Image (tube, helix red, strand yellow):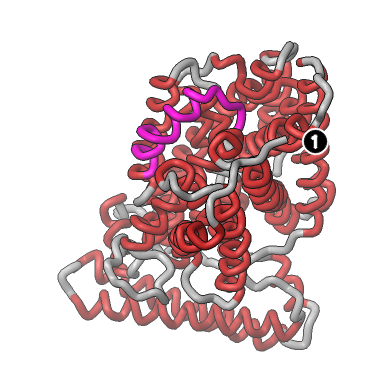
Amino acid sequence: MQTIDWIILIGTLLFIVLYGTWKTKGSKNVQEYIRGGNEAKWWTIGLSVMATQASAITFLSTPGQAFHSGMGFVQFYFGLPIAMVIICMVFIPLYHKLNVYTAYEYLESRFDLKTRSLTAILFLIQRGLAAGITIFAPAIILSAVLGWNLTTLNIIIGILVIIYTVSGGTKAVSVTQKQQMAIIFSGMFIAFFLIISYLPEGVTFSKALDIAGASGKMDILDFSFNLDNRYTFWSGIIGGTFLALSYFGTDQSQVQRYLSGKSIKESQLGLLFNGLLKVPMQFFILLVGVMVFVFYQFNPSPLNFNPKAKEVIANSEYVQEYEILENKLVETNSLKETYINNYLADSETYKNKTLIKDLNIKNQQLRDDAKALIKKADPDQETNDKDYVFIHFILNNLPRGLIGLLLAVILSAAMSSTASELNALASTTVIDLYKRNVKEEKTEKHYVNASKFFTLVWGILAILVACFANLFDNLIQLVNIIGSIFYGNVLGIFLLAFFIKYVHSNATFIAALITQAIVIIGWYYDWMPYLWLNLFGCVLVMAIAMIIQPIIGSKPKTSN
């Protein structure tokens, strides 16, 4: 990194922190601090909702996912627009009618305090873990690639977020997320057009798509019902809808974004805006990854994009075996480039297309063999390199200045998601647990200070989780797996509350405990792809509650 990159990176991050702190200081009451004074317009809500979901993991992992597996991951988001419509019709009017600060307040009015508290605790567990991963994701990758200290990076990212989130609460999160999304979109569009410009002369965007298609990277839709396929049209439409319903309808980090709207209409428009823009945005980010793949068809690529893995091999007895694999990769890439040029000259020649696919399979086998060698050299070393593909391209190919901008994109995304998560964790802790169980009356200022205190506490806990986290198969999948373990159960509780009126609190509470245990067991033993856990958990908790309700009978709702 050059001086100009450091200036752009540090200047961007400091501007976000200082602007957010200055713009939103001085919340006088809980309504201002937690719901932002209900001043948010629909576009602010839409961008805030989008920024909360689009963490650094999205911009690091998604291009790498497309590089390795193609565009099929976009099916994961097919259920999101459906969920947005349902939430606008059912959830938002109800939340506004009850004038709640958190989603879980409603559950006490429908069931009882213990059901509200259980649901809030489930949220705190999964979102607390996710907040740590949101910090950890960019930190571990930047530390590996740039040589920065991992713990120091975790602390820096966490502290930057804590400063303005503690100071301004929900309004600070919403205000800064608009700036962050502007930086993110600008950086990704610049990167995309630069990748296209780096392709050989004569390789236009349409021809780049032909190359990607010949390599199997443009296979978007999979209509199979095979549960071994993680991403299909059906898992996206069904499992994705239930995941999105749970996340946007019951997760306080998202609910708090649209509870800050000026009116029901502003909140609904904000969510519909997110529903319309989210799938194209994810398609575009995946397309960036596919274009990176095309770029590396004409340029040398490492056998493994994780620099730490290469370092492990260099200091092991397997270094010569690894070099043999690297030479084979160079040979196959050279041969593949020849076939690609022949294919571009005559795209109707099916033989060349088949040969390209065969060489891609051979390349993947070489990469798998390399991973096996890395594991032999150090069993504890993470061999997955999906999350390093895009950052490798950025650091090795972008001009000075733009490297700093793209790093600012990654860190801005991390900060925007983490800020929403800390804000929601603190709100839920104060409103659903602390305030509800404090007997004596407290002032508004007391609860504002309590919210700031718990924001700080959750920020510190998130930093600690980040410091002790480990890289998973793919970071974007890890966050969605954590959500899928809890979200189906929580959504089922809300659907019982909304629509199944004969089911009461005790049946719901018992069913939720049983369901959560079964879902965790199902995930551990890999009963099904994780997206289906959302549907499984939702249906299971509702079925168990409806079955046991007649057995235990109706009991009056209890409260404290």
Q: Is residue 175 above or below residue 254?
A: above
The N terminus, quarter of image: top right
Q: Which residue is mark 1?
A: 159
Residues in magenta, as a range: 83-102
Which residue is found at the position 49% from the left and 41% from the top?
Answer: 248
* Residue 169 image offset from top left, x and y in percent: 69, 24
Q: Quadrant of residue 485?
A: bottom right
Left/right placement of residue 338 relative to residue 531 reads left
Q: Residue at x 55, y 29 (%)?
A: 257
Tell me the crowding category of disc 1: few under 14, some 14 to 19, or many 20 or more residues within 10 angstroms, Cα based.
some
Residue 89 belongs to magenta span: yes
Nearest the viewer among 492 and 454 is 492
Residue at image location 73% in from the left, 19% down from the top = 21
The percent coordinates of residue 300 (x first, y second) are 52, 66
| 62 or 293: nearer the viewer | 62
Camera sees residue 6:
no
